[in-house]
Amino acid sequence: MQVVRLPKRIVRLIITSFVSSCLFLVFLDDKNLTTFPLLTSSSFRPVSYSNTNDGSTQDLCKSFPRHLLQSIQPVLKMGWTESQKQIHAQLETVSACFDPNDLLIVSDYEETILGRVTIDIFETLPEEYRRRSRDFARHNAMKRKPLNMDDGRAETTHHKLGWKMDKYKFLAQVEYAWSTMPGRDWYVFYETDTYVLWDSMFRFLSTLDAAEALYIGSPSPGRRGTWFANGGPGFVLSRGAMQKVLGKDQGWLTSRGAKATRRDCCGDSVLGWMLWQARVPLSGFYPLFSLYAVDRVPFTERAWCQPVITMHKLTPGDMLRLWRWEHGNRKRDTPILFSDLYEFTGINETDVRYDWDNTSYDRLAPGRELAAETHESCRAACEADGKCLQYLWRGLQEKHCVLMPFVSLGKAGGQDAGSGMYVSGWMHSRIEDWRAGNVCEDAAWVHPSIARHF
Ligand SMILES: *[C@@H]1O[C@H](CO)[C@@H](O)[C@H](O)[C@H]1NC(C)=O
Ligand SMILES: CC(=O)N[C@H]1CO[C@H](CO)[C@@H](O)[C@@H]1O
């Protein structure tokens, strides 16, 4: 057999071009991960208050830049079976400063809550959704019953059905927003347990071009290798995106997406899939749109100087506290950053918390696990490991110790609350050293990327 021998020079050329194209790819990827400073300015007047404990909600709302709502349309999605407490917390914080006409509330039931009218978005769906659908039949039956709001909402079968029906709201709410409030620059979709820092959102949107077809949010893996914006932290569609998808046919999403919705578990992934097919792929902005609640944010370099725009799964209590805190902590030239949020958490107040579970997770910083008889020996192991900032010890039969190179708050209890199962602790002098070396001069804005996710 004859072996073809290439001249050395050509081999070298092939190798160098291969290596440089690899480097180029790495560089491209790297660009997605690098941050850049950007001067933005708050539209709130006053930007912040020195005392936010006494003022009423209306007082604090006086600072809200309502004129921006001529170009930015908020759309809140809720469900009739959701917890009253959660809905009220949302309407008294994130959505508190909107006039009833500023905010669209889409639900599966028409009602008035705290003076705000919700619409039954299912009424807008084409007939084929209801045809032969057991879900819709059961849902209609539920709606016909006399409703006892307090109990009805908490009832499990209702709750389950409500959750199951949630997926049918996504495509419909996008069409509804565009047809009732057409031509806005931005449509911001969020849920009752989403916390939106409007100051950060307004700054962020002011840096983008609404004429471009933009679909913005926190990336989650979807169908056939595509990515969609997770519904929890909320997502944004630009005028350009709306025009591209609905410009010619206002009902394109719901009419073409019926089958996909029936098959899929979740409405956010169906929406992402439909948008992808309409050539509006996701612009991923993690961690700015964060999947984590205050107690779960893993504070690491990738979530430190970055602005916080939205968070997900906030408890009603955290929403109320955070909203007041936010009004006392806005700055004119920088949005609220994760490093600011760290101060809100109060992690620094205690060295050890008993019966306390970290429940946190950072994909890129998994931590080191080892056996430890006592939580004191777990702490000693953390002390001995220069990278360890926080530890979690699980007692009882497990005697397991996790050393973590990041910080997060966690919360009381966990599955075995009261059993003495969990002990969490922090290395505050090390954390303070880390903070001193990572002071945020500017907000670290990021380019869109789906490589950067949860
Ligand atoms: C924790 O941080 C807050 C906010 O920066 C500060 O006011 C407080 O004094 C700190 N507490 C301790 C124990 O260092
Ligand atoms: C209950 C729980 O989620 N605990 C987690 C605490 O953090 C460590 C490190 O990330 C995880 O391994 C645990 O599962």
Image: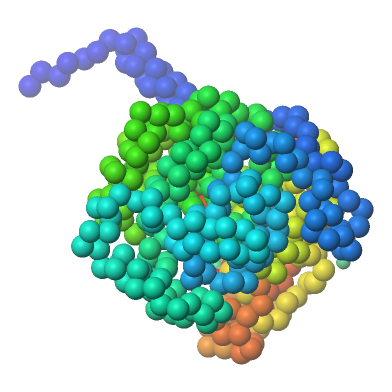
Q: Nearer the viewer, residue 425 or 57?
A: 57
Identify the residue at image location x=42%, y=68%. Answer: 162
Say left or right for 87 vs 78: right
Position of residue 94 measured from the top left corner of the image (x, y, whole percent): 68, 55
Residue 322 placement: quadrant: bottom right
Position of residue 301 measured from the top left corner of the image (x, y, whole percent): 67, 47
Position of residue 284 measured from the top left corner of the image (x, y, whole percent): 51, 40
Q: Nearer the viewer, residue 453 or 394?
A: 453
State whether residue 226 is above or below residue 430: above
Whether residue 92 is visible here, answered yes or no, is: yes
Q: Nearer the viewer, residue 121 or 38?
A: 121
Identify the residue at image location x=17%, y=16%. Answer: 4
State whether residue 133 is above or below residue 231: below
Residue 116 placement: quadrant: bottom right
Position of residue 410 measured from the top left corner of the image (x, y, whole percent): 65, 69
State whether residue 332 is above or below residue 78: above
Q: How is the image coloured?
A: rainbow
Name of the residue lying farthest toward the right:
50
State whether residue 52 is above or below residue 134: above
Residue 378 placement: quadrant: bottom right
Say left or right for 261 vs 417: left
Name the quarter showing ligand 2: bottom right
Say left or right for 389 vs 213: right
Q: Nearer the viewer, residue 176 or 351?
A: 176
